[in-house]
Amino acid sequence: MTFSSKSTDLGSLKPWKLRAGCQRVPLWAPEKKQVTLLTGAPDNPQRSAMIPCGQWCLAPEDLPEGCAYAFEVEGKGPFPDPRARLYLPGSQTWGVTADIGAISRSSQWHPDEKLLGKVWYELHLGTFTPAGTLKAARAKLPYLADLGVEVIELMPTAFFPGERGWGYDGVGLYALFNPYGSPKDLVDFIDRAHELGIAVTQDLVLNHLGVCGNYLAQFAPYFSARHHTPWGDGYNLDGADSTLVREFLLGAALALLRDYGFDGLRLDAVHEIKDDSKLHFLAELSLRVADLSQNLGRPLTLVAESDLNNSRMVTPVEQGGYGMDGQWDDDIHHGIHVAFTGETQGYYEDFADTAALSKIYSQVFYHNGTYSSFRGKNWGAPVPEDMERNRFFGFASNHDQVGNRALGDRPSEKLSPGLLAGQAALVLASPFTPLLFQGEEWGSRSRFQFFTDFPDETIGNAVNEGRKSEFASHDWDKIYEGEVTVPIPQALSTFLNSKLLWQELSEEKHQKMLNWHRLLIRLRREGVFADFISLQRQANLLVLSTERAQVIVNLGTQQENIGELVRPAIPSSYYSFTDGLLGSLPLKIGGEDVLLIVFD
């Protein structure tokens, strides 16, 4: 590819305003004396000098759509564009120009509210279907619409080297993981979901980059030794040149919402985003997303995964908060898990308190300034009584709580169908925003294990050994009642064993569980579970009450009398998971069963 001399006239161009990963492929490379643009075939590229423009440099003229390109920096490389929108298949160093915003869309999606309080569904594209692609997942969208799902949360789709993984080691934040399909496939997936009335959100990792394929340091001071994270040096969000580091991360988030049409983002482990700036990065992101929402004319939702147990995360920026709309609440999961399984190892220990669930459903966090034995100190802070409870996400399963068990086993392997149904009722009838994990709705027994595919053998071996040693002290042998062999992350079989078993739906017991979830979701969407009153525990019975319904779960194996627990109102419907729709109010509830009472 050759460039004409007239193409070097930059005029009034502002590099940071240009589209990322296409046309002039703007690159932030301060203090780099020589940056060379490589185009064409990677094994025989053409070389052209990038044009300096302050701390940035630009291609001499627009690159055509679909052009393979990379950079050399002061004679080293090739390195990928940090803001590449697409990677060359099979390469971790070459990008392909792609103007995502120019992809045509078919849906006329005009939601009128944020996504809090709706029914969310978390899925991993690689394991959700046998094919593991966006096209295959798109074909399942009518099923999710029929289930009653209102919001899909995709686990991370950012580019990383290899053919499989959870996605939390992404290195190309602006690009799509190639095995899932093309950018057009992702746009089509979102369009189809919107046509069916389902919003789509994306899990985005802004606390670190993966170790394999991370070349950011070759270009600019993206990282700082001032802040340490579990993955090494943190992003440079508050030091010299931090403005453009922040812009890099903000741009990745905004591009997903603007160019692909996502309705929101789930931000991974934000407690590991280290920033001492006056305006914290999360607060700035909240303000920028609010501006984008206004420009696009549609609501956008930000949800944080935070370990801090602090409502400041969802407090508006103007009130001194970080401005997130919602946050995951692991305490809800832990309280449910311990009550139903009896497991009390590790961080579950404190939740053995029989009053734990009642406190959580009333006060949001169990650790809200109280002592955490797992952390060895007081943790969290109280949530204001008038703060909307739908800002907090509740779940009985998610990718972390399943995948970070030694075997990646679900509650369905340990609990009876009646207890699984009870968990579902407590989540879907709760005052929180409910989230289901793929296959949970039919009680799937398919495992979701930790799988990777690092091309670097040294890194891959380190991950295998690290996973093994990490679990060595977790007393898994006591939980599983025998010796445990932790699946090898790098093994292809670990990935294949994590594929969702759709064939289970042909079995009556799984259809029964699916229908139970459909009922609960329908009632939730009809407002039956609005106006939460309380959740109380009496021995083996859990009683959740709203203005229009009661849920009674029997954790024990024996029948229990419930006459005194039912509110004195005229009920219209009674549902038992075991026996289905009942003709009258039963005086007792069977062992390991759940009773749903809906009042007029």
Image (tube, grey):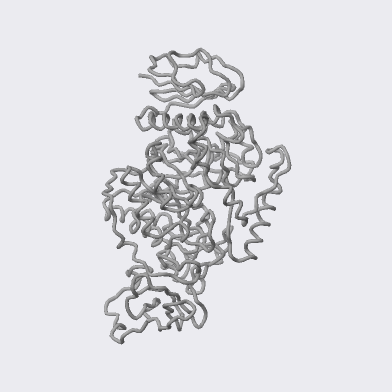
Residue 580: percent from the left, percent from the top?
Answer: 46, 21
Pick whichever, 346 or 90, lies toward us.
90
Residue 246: percent from the left, percent from the top?
Answer: 42, 63
Residue 310: percent from the left, percent from the top?
Answer: 49, 44
Q: How many marks?
A: 0
Q: Give left or right: position of 122 versus 52.
A: right
**Viewport quadrant of the N terminus:** bottom left
Residue 269: percent from the left, percent from the top?
Answer: 51, 52
Residue at position x 61%, y 34% in the image: 414
Outermost residue to the bottom:
5
Q: Give left or right: position of 160 versus 385.
A: right
Above or below — where is 581 with respect to 60? above
Q: Give left or right: position of 58 versus 205.
A: left
Above or below — where is 10 with respect to 470? below
Above or below — where is 433 with respect to 553? below
Above or below — where is 64 with respect to 315? below
**Viewport quadrant of the C terminus:** top left
Q: Quadrant of residue 419?
A: top right
